[in-house]
Amino acid sequence: MNCHLRLAGRLGSALIATLMASAPARALEEVVIEIPLLETRFTVRLDELQSPEALRQGNSDLAELDRATGGAAGRQLRELLLQPVPLSVKQVADGSVGSPLLEQAMLVIASLGTVEGRTTDLSGRTLNEALLRASANGEPTLLSLMQAIPGQRVTLNLGRARQIVTRMAGQRQQAEALLATTTAAALPAGTTNGPGVAVNRRLASLQVPHRPQPLEVMVIEPASGANGRLVLISHGLWDKPTSFEGWGTLLSSRGYTVVLPRHPGSDSSQQEAVLAGQAPPPGPEELALRPQDLSGVLDAVLAGRLGFARPVDAERVVVLGHSWGATTALQVAGVRPTDSSLRQRCSNVDDPDRNLSWTLQCSWLKGAQNAALRDPRVIAVGAVSPPVSLLFPRGSGGELSGRVLLVSGSRDWVVPPDPEAIQPMRWGKTLGNQLVLVQDGDHFNLRPGQNSAGGAVGPLLLAWTEAAFAAGPAVRPSPGAAPLLTGQAWGNADLPMADVTSRLASP
């Protein structure tokens, strides 16, 4: 994909966002880009972009620039704006009207600028109407989309964008300070703490009562030396089990039986369907369905429906998860979702704690009150980069039945560490839960893929899993409980990490 098409995709998404926040009015005439630092406004008249001749005869800022560059500026801009929008936008719009996930994204993007001559409307009807106009002569382009936007003028404020970037940087400052004053964990001896056993992989299909379609699961078992202990791994939004196969391989090579369910309402296949216009974004009901997927797997294991080579104990289980999967893990460990913070804070685009993960969290509003599912069979969870600050209000977690290890990267701009990990763990540490921060870890480099050593945090999750099972009854969270994760060698040379729990300020 060339650079013009990539930029076209980004602009197309922004234009769709603008359309979602529009109501019927006359067609857009001008686009103004404000650069406050330079006190500059760059104006483009859309009718001048109809042809090179129209631009040469125009009187906008762009027309003057085009004449000064011998037509080069106009040619490059038209080449960009005439690119087809690389999504089935009409189908996406049809399937996404009223989607809370899309509406939250539109709310944030709309805060970056204004469209004069229209009123706010997030119903999606205006989007459909504008796309019909833009597609009247064939596949919509960026130019035809801009011409279809209701309003008189759109102003994009780059200063506003700068404010958001500054806020994002500030949401990582506490993590950087904690890491700078905490000794990094020692490195394991060898890539995986010594040799492990061979593992076997297979796919299985489970009928579950809460979904109409079977649940696909990946099963990873040790070829020999199984210890009879079970671990579940939950993937994040628009992801898949193979992205976490490395964790499963490492754990299975140490004797654990590992099951990785595919969450069908929010996996990579569902994302493909959304982009093709064949499905809407995930609905708030998925917040409750995902933990039911995990409990459904445990029920199937107890019923002997997964046909393991060796018996496993499904009454004492560790769950690992990443991103939304980490939130799912926390739910089955007993953290109860509520809608109180969601209702109070989701509409405020200037909230100092607002971050990209709020787009997803706020889409859960209508499902939060019915999404509690504490499964007492879960004794501990490893939650990597979970979006939690709105879903689980501060001080929640008193009903935890499973111990929690929370892992966050210092460079995670999707789920930044300060509001999403450090603040919640100030309360969570009182029950023996722990927080590990990863220097230069982001939302994606903590995923292992198919790395058989488990990627950057594989040794950490292995150490946590082994400590949880070894603790016996003492694994349950309780006031003053001793930490499970101590001084073992579970660090990483490329992404140093440290347990900062003891350095967190009290709530």
Image (cartoon, rainbow, N blue to C red):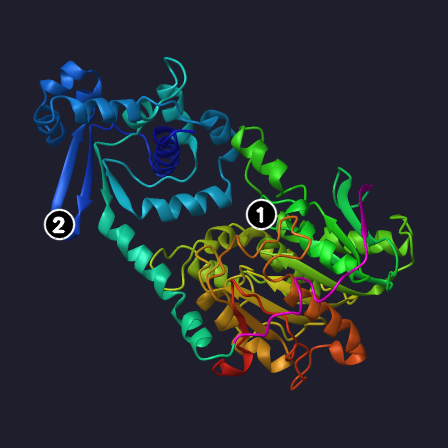
Q: Is residue 89 visible?
A: yes
Of 459 and 82, nearer the camera is 459
Residue 250 position (above or below residue 422): above
Q: Amino acid at mark 1?
A: Leu
In the displayed structure, 24 sits above or below 340; it is above
In-image side of 439 versus 64 (left or right):
right
- The quadrant where residue 123 appears: top left
Compared to residue 308, the image places residue 94 above or below, namely: above
Query: Residue at point 43% right, 60% down?
Result: 345
Q: Do the CB atoms of the residues marked 2 and 1 lie less than 8 Å apart?
A: no
Position of residue 230 in the picture relative to residue 385 (left or right): right
Magenta stretch: helix, strand or loop mostly = loop
Q: Position of residue 36 (x, y in %)?
A: 16, 50
For this rendering, which residue is in front, 120 or 332? 332
Q: Nearer the viewer, residue 224 or 447?
A: 224
Which quadrant would residue 469 be assigned to in this image?
A: bottom right
Crowding around mark 1 (Cα neighbors within 10 Å: few <14, some 14 to 19, many 20+) is: some
Q: Which residue is mark 1?
A: 237
Residue at the extreme bottom: 480
Magenta span covers which residues? 184-206
Q: How many marks?
A: 2
Q: Nearer the viewer's eye, disc 2 or disc 1?
A: 2
- At horizontal 63% and vertical 42% (from top left) the residue drawn is 267
Confirm whether the magenta stretch covers residue 462.
no
Q: Which residue is mark 2?
A: 38
Separation of marks 2 and 1 at Cα, in angstroms: 39 Å
Q: Does 201 appear above or below 403?
A: above
Instruction: Sort mark 2 into few (<14), some (14-19) or many (20+) by Cα contacts within 10 Å.
Output: few
Q: Horizontal and vertical percent for residue 51?
A: 20, 15
